[in-house]
Image (tube, rainbow, N blue to C red):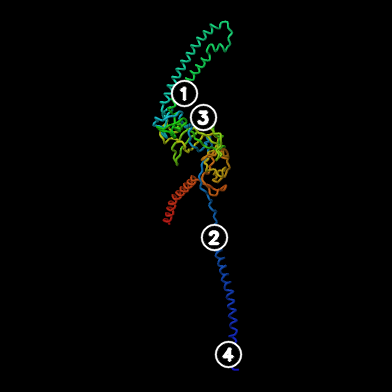
Amino acid sequence: MSDQDRQAGHGDLQDESRPHGNLFVRFLTRLLLPAVVIAAGVLGAVKLYRTGPKAKRRTPAPQVTLVEVEPAVRGDKRVVVQVMGTVIPAREIALQAEVGGRVVEVSENFVPGGLLREGETLLQIEPRDYELIVDQRQSELARARRDYKLEEGRREIAKREWELHSKGGNASETDTELALREPQLAAAKAALDAAQASLEQARMNLARTTLKAPFDAVIRETSADLGAQVAPQTPIATLAGTRGCWVKASVGVDRLKWLNIPRAGAGGGSPAVVRLVVGDETVAEREGRLFRLLGDIESQGRMAQILVEVDDPLALSSTGKPEGALLLGSFVHVDIEGSRLQGVFAVGREAIRDGRFVWLMSNKGTLVIRKVDIAWRGRETIFVGGGLQEGDRIVTSGIAAPVEGMALVTEEELEAERAKGAARDGASAGRQPAADTTGRSREQQK
């Protein structure tokens, strides 16, 4: 074999073993290279962590909640029972005709809303028929008086005759009465009395043809007019008294103990203030007094019912102006004075938490949750009988998540801290120019 052939065969063997070497190199490259990269990254991160700057730990600033407070003040307070009610007339009648006839005259005030004085004439029924009856009864009375006097004269004559003929006789009592005409005299006396009564009745009927106001009143409704034919018991008008009215209100049974309710014939009850409110404006305000406690409970609310008496509801005697009047049917607010509580704290309703708790701000500026004893619950103010001390700072504003001991601050304290900080900043600013001047002078000396 020649040398050329051996060299060609050796080259073929090298070509066959080359693919196995390349595979091994590629395997090592894929396996080791990622590991080397990861190791280098880890070492770099560790070095950065160890050699990098470290942040200093700080104590977090305390979270402070801004609140509003008011001091607790002990004192004697008057309970005020606040209710609502309806104005109703204290006196109201349906005026009716007592005799029949045609209406021939009416008053100019005989209209709905007309004001009447006691004794003022409302209307006049035709009186002529009743005047004739009065004349007739007067004639009958005159005849009855004549007959009675004649019978008295006959009795005197009979008495004398009886005395002459009955001497020594034993007459019975009946014979004596008949002889003396006692029955005839009694009949004449009865006829005279009947004639007098008939005349009195006729005069009364004549007076009843004139209808007058029985008291100071306002006309609520009219049912007759000029020219109308009326009969006895015919409705004429509905009158409501103007000297006083009642406010019928409902109050909780548990609150009656605080009120002074008068009994019949006793003195006046608890004072009250009645206000007619339209929107946000009080258009009428009158003083009144508790008058009566009604004997039944209202069917729906199961509350007690009271009457508050108010004088001159239409303001006729004071100003006579309708804008100050309590009109019938008005829905009004009533504030009734009750008993006096001694040594209690007046707290706004918004400061009472969960019905029986208050939030207090301690001297250290932390929240204190305390249970209190409620002596009276009003519509806007609550009287606390126990659980508070004079000078306690009651938190009146809201706190989103109240926790016992949390830090609190008031606006006044915050303003004071700001003022102190501003004063310190001003003092520091005043000292800084002097230091700068000193530094510059030293540099100049150098």
Mark in front: 4 vs 2: 4
The amino acid on which the numbered mark 4 sits, given as a three-letter code, is Ala
Which residue position is annotated with label 3? 268
Residues at circles 1 and 2 in contact by the CB criterion of under 8 Å = no
Asked if 90 appears above or below 185 in the picture, the reply is below
Asked if 416 appears above or below 130 in the picture, the reply is below
State the residue at coordinates (58%, 92%): 5
Mark in front: 2 vs 3: 3
CA distance for labels 3 and 1:
42 Å
Mark in front: 4 vs 1: 1
Tell me the tag on residue 152: none
CA distance for labels 3 and 4:
144 Å
Which residue position is annotated with label 2? 54
- Asked which secondary structure carries label 3, the reply is loop
Tell me the tag on residue 8: 4
- Asked which secondary structure carries label 4, the reply is helix
| Quadrant into which the N terminus falls | bottom right
Task: Give the percent coordinates (x, y) of residue 62.
Answer: 54, 51
The amino acid on which the numbered mark 3 sits, given as a three-letter code, is Gly
Which residue position is annotated with label 1? 201
Give the mark nearer the N terminus: 1 vs 2: 2
Give the mark nearer the N terminus: 4 vs 2: 4
The amino acid on which the numbered mark 1 sits, given as a three-letter code, is Gln
Which quadrant holds residue 256? top right
- Asked which secondary structure carries label 1, the reply is helix
